[in-house]
Image (spheres, helix red, strand yellow):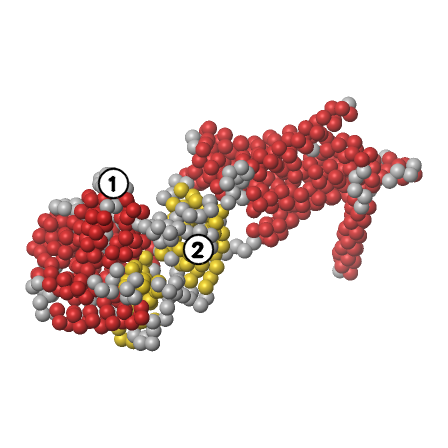
Amino acid sequence: MRMRTVEISAGAFVLAGTLALIFLAVRVSGVNLTADRSSYTVLARFDDVAGLQTRARVSIAGVTVGRVAAIDIDLEYGEAIVSMELKGSGGVLSTDTGAQILTEGILGARYISLLPGADEETLFDGDVIEDTQGAMVLENLIGDLLTRLGAS
Amino acid sequence: MIGFIRGVGNRSLERLASIGRATLVLVAALWRLPRLADIPLIVKQIYQVGVLSLVIVVLSAFCIGAVLALQFHTQLARFGAQDAVGVGLALVLLRELGPVVTALLFAGRAGSAITAEIGLMKTTEQLSSMEMMGVDPLQRIVAPRLWAGFVSLPLLTAIFNVVAIYGGMMVAVDWMGGDQGGFWSGIQAEVDIWDDIGKGVLKSVAFAVVVTWIAVFQGYDTEPTPEGIGLATTRTVVMSSVMVLAIDFLLTLSMYGDFK
Amino acid sequence: MVVFSNQLTAFAGVKLATSPPPALSGLIGLIRLIGVIGLFGWVLSANAAGSSARDVVANTSDDLQALIEEARDYVDEDPERFFVAVETLLRPVVDFAGFARNVMAVYYKQATEDQRERFAEVFKWRLVRSYALALTDFSDGEAILVPAARPPRSPKRESVKMEIHTSTGEIYPLVYSMALGSDGVWRMRNIIINGVNIGLTYRNQFKSAASDNRYGGDLDRVIDAWANVMQTNVDEDSVGKAEDGGKAEDGGKAEDVGKAENGGKAENGGKTAEDGGKAQGEVTSADEAGS
């Protein structure tokens, strides 16, 4: 086998492999190299975040505008504190924006839906969303109703 | 009874000894990073080990990707969630199947070839004559193959993943009538470059070290007989496969642990 | 508790254009029923050393208890008088305008001054009527103020937590979001009943209605629809109550159904009344379930 052919094909192979890696990194992972990478973090306190995981979607009217960055607990008040990383640099959502934990489709992944409010002031990095609705476990609600009706 | 225990003891000690020898070989071969003069050797080995494995890797990738997409689609359609085929396919490939299957294919094709080659050199006394001429066979024969293996397997894994995803896409979109935009945007939304791709690359590097090391050592350590070479080659494939799967299990646990 | 199902209909929720599943609206109704009791209920152990927000809640509860006792005589014949009395009592301590603004959310900015006021009025009366009716019916349950649900957000906002302990042993948590007005008075801005954020729930439904094609984005029509729901609910309940200590006879229900057919949607046992037969059937079964 000619050395030249060997070298060329080995080189081509390495090139192809590297391109494959780059393709995976850029096209498959959805890493956005060019666009605005700025983001700001907003906190929200929930009484129940059952099923919500980090990296869950944060969306407004169905459009993804960020991800859940972290979920912490406040043991003193028994609440969960969710940190959301939102695209942009703030100044878009009103301070009385509401945050609800909803369920996505059939497979049941939880996500956060933001409902913009009426305030003039807006949320910036580090602000807290006050108006929240935790995850509603439907079975519990139905159970409550049946208990009430049964008791009466 | 005593004989049995003695046998077990002997075999265990022999195992330990071979692990020791393997480590010595590895260290002796790698302690010196490749010099400029060694590059041609490494390039040749990359050809032998990487390029010649391309065919089997690409074909398997396409078939596996297509089959996975098919199976996923069937199962997810039961829940009306067939749009999740892309995401499931990509995650499974990037995290698990890509690195593992490529490593297994590599062990079968390139690993056994390395073992056979080195074993033959040992049997035909080429290695000892090299030593007598003052050329260190570890540097000249073993090291290039090691480096080539370390480089080739991760690249092969990347190629495998890409081809498999495309194979899956052809099934999910062209054949099953899925939505191409949905397929890709779903993948891009859920695949994380560090969590999924990065860890997959890490796995492939770990597998590369393990498979190439086993292949090289089995060849170097073989009994210098034709039967010995045959045995060594088999042992390479078997041991590589088992180690790859075992290490995959451990790596997965540590990488994606914290299962709720 | 036969009339319970009747009351369920009163609170069964703001269903305008898009309805949550029937069971859920019935549940929301139930939950609000309970919650309202908390809002206007009896406080047995108020923390007197608490902040003024808590005092406002405690005092209002006491005042309402007195009002209910006094109103027992005339409420059946003249429910309107009772509603007005409740509204008068609540006006100084509930920020209905703020609550309504919260519900309108982004649409508040688009709305004219006139629309904002109109919605605030409609919204207020809807709340007042629903809750006032529940009050007269619900006779068991203690309301207990408990330590704060979360740290005070700011000097001007605070959450006051209360628990309703029913005679059957259930405990329902309530959280009142209180806001300090510029006049130094604490008023209720939102309420969270058993984990359900009522303001957000209403906000969602307002948003659905406003974007519903049926109303074509016309806020006036949305507000009208909101008002109609309330109106129909009220008539049903008055009639239902007038029958007798609450037992729902078929005759009474037929009238309800008649009203349900025109104007807005009406809930019976939580389901939308599309036609008379259907509504009757469902109410009957709800009654059976209730008794």
Rendered image: mark on residue A127: 2
Mark 1 or mark 2, whichever is nearer to me: 2
Position of C36 compared to A97: left or right? Answer: left
Position of A22 with respect to A116 (left or right) is right
Mark on residue C217? 1
- Up-down relation of residue B207 to residue C231 (above or below): above
Estimate the x, y position of residue A129 in percent, counting from the top left: 40, 55
- Between B89 and C240, the residue placed more toward the observer is C240
Q: Where C43 falls versus C5 (above or below)?
A: below
Q: Secondary structure at mark 2?
A: loop
What residue type is disc 1 on?
Gly
Please tell me how crowded label 2 is: few (under 14), some (14-19), or many (20+) other residues with Cα within 10 Å.
Answer: some
* Left or right of residue A86, residue C133 in this image: left
The residue positioned 46% from the left and 45% from the top of the image is: A88
Where is residue B223? Give x, y as percent.
82, 42
Q: Amino acid at mark 2?
A: Asp
Q: Position of residue B98 (x, y in %)?
A: 59, 39
Measured along the vertical axis of the image, is residue B98 above or below residue C279?
above
Residue under the image location 20 percent in, 69 percent down: C64
Q: Is residue C215 left or right of residue B5?
A: left
Q: How far, Cα to Cα, is label 1 from label 2? A: 32 Å
Q: Nearer the viewer, residue C237 or B227?
A: C237
Residue located farthest toward the front when viewing the structure as drawn:
C183
Residue B45 appears at what percent x and percent y?
Answer: 75, 33
Residue A131: image tag: none
Residue A20 visible? The answer is yes
Residue shown at the point (74%, 43%) measured from the top left = B213
Q: Quadrant of the N terminus of chain B?
A: bottom right
Q: Is disc 1 placed on a helix, strand or loop?
A: loop
Q: Crowdedness of circle 1 by 10 Å Cα count: few (<14), some, many (20+)?
A: some
Rendering quarter of residue C159: bottom left
Chain of the residue under the numbered disc 2 shown in the image: A
